[in-house]
Amino acid sequence: MIIDNPVLRGFHPDPSMIRVGDTYYIATSTFEWFPGVRIHSSRDMVHWQYVTSVLDSKRMIDMRGDPSSGGVWAPDLSYADGRFWLVFSDVKMVTGTFKDGTNYLTSAERIDGPWTDPIPLNYVGFDASLFHDDDGRKYLVQQTWDHREYHHHFDGISLTEFDTDTMHLLPETARTIWRGTDAKLSEGPHIYKINGWYYLFAAEGGTTYAHQETVSRSRTLDAESFLTMPGDEPFLGNFDTPRSYLQKQGHGSLVDTPSGEWYYASLCGRPWHRPEESVNDPRGWCTLGRETSIQKVDWDQDGWPHIEGGHGGKRFVEAPSDAMESDGTTEHHQHDDFQSNKLGPDWNTLRVPFDRKMGSVGGGSLQLRGQGSLHNLFDLSLVARRWQAFEFDAQVRLSFDPHTYQAMAGLTNYYSDANFSWIFVTWDEERKTRVIEVAQSDRNRYTSYLKEKAIPVPEGADVWLRTQVRRATYSYRYSFDGRQWYPVPVTLDAAILSDDYVLQELDGYFTGAFVGMAAVDYSGYGEMATFRAFDYKEQ
């Protein structure tokens, strides 16, 4: 069997991979999207199946008001003492000098729960992981944040002992164990004890095209005792391999197989380029966000790990020799007729769970009550799923009878509160009729494209809305019967829905594009929109 990277496609970053018996698990970041922390399982590293989302209620996390690309950063999944342990951050500030937030710990006997109420740990820095030493002691390992403008913000990797009797950290034991290299931006640490050595794997260079993974080691966990792998070559990275299929590889985790092989799961990106663009600069546009790849690891005679085939990694990787073929799919088609009274695992909301304030689902429809605009960080009725292919069609049937231009409902392609577009039905008070409009927010600059040419909707008619995404561009269509479709004469730039584009002006954006349904009524009267028969089909 062959691993075809990425193994988790579309917005599945910061993978924390472990093995329990013959089963591998990967936990990935979800940022401001709810539910938080997606977990997949596999027995062969080739086929991966969704298992659960750990943070599935307000009891587990409340991200209301969290900024875009805040929320759940870099979950760390581990297994010890007959339990699964999960450490995660809830980050409340993304841009600026400070990175306010809290690191939490939850645990469970089974991967699908029930998980314990999260315990607040600290917030020395983000990307915290829990290391279980073979003497029974446990340590929190984390990036350390320095707000001072006259210091570098990334102040090395620190370690603090965790007392399992009190379930609290012992701050008097805190020490910096590694300062990082001149690549800077040291984060995402994980420690592994192998053959008497403590190995520290840490990401550096930032999560753009200069991203990389660096390895250091020590015989002890003493302060500043870790020495970096000899030479200038990173363990994993693509800053000097611009033509590689995978880019941005780095932040991730190490795992061994039952027969003693080693693999490394990493975040990655797959950029596309416009015909006139250099492959070097700009490196490209990753509209699917940061995904998960897996590379095979070899060890040299001095006990240092290396990515098989070189630090740039490979798209196709040999699966473990002892792999047990498991279920899973590489196709991401979806049809939802909303018969169930619960949203399926492909669906996500922003910051808070789907509830009665947002709407209802079941009996053949999804009803969304109009709340704040798509810029809103607190009260927003939006249900969406990840883009998982560069080319796909998505469509939905909409029943909506607004009475004000302040009420809108439709189909959206959404990256963040600042970057999105949508095709929607609203009210035209001059023509006294419902109309179809297309609008885009580009770094908070909102543009309506049709204006006085907005398309009238026949009285009493439902509207079918469709988006067609074709790698570098995408467009919208509409229908009044679900059979005859009409194009909207607007072609939009898909790059606007990518980290790479947003980061040209703003700092700290790490997610990916979503497609879904939204209802807005900022008049405050809560106009209701009814959606039926959603389809997502990759081309």
Image: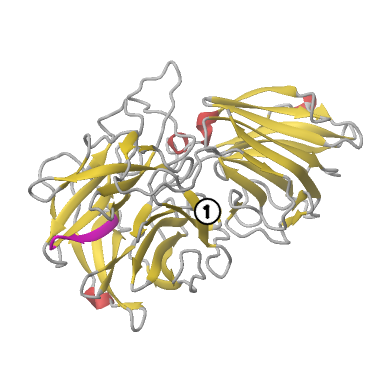
Q: In the image, is residue 24 above or below residue 390?
A: below
Query: 121 or 347, which is in the foreground?
Result: 347
Query: 75 or 494, which is in the foreground?
Result: 75
Residue 463 figure quarter: top right
Place of residue 50 in the rendered image (x, y in percent of width and height, measured from the top left): 51, 52
Residue 449 figure quarter: top right
Residue of label 1:
32
Q: In the image, is residue 448 above or below residue 415?
A: above
Q: Secondary structure at mark 1?
A: loop
Q: Quarter holding the N terminus?
A: top left
Does the stretch in magenta take in 88?
Answer: no
Query: 439 or 470, which is in the foreground?
Result: 470
**Residue 61 visible, this angle:** yes
Q: Is residue 341 left or right of residue 201?
A: right
Q: Is residue 152 left or right of residue 269?
A: left
Q: Quarter holding the C terminus?
A: top right
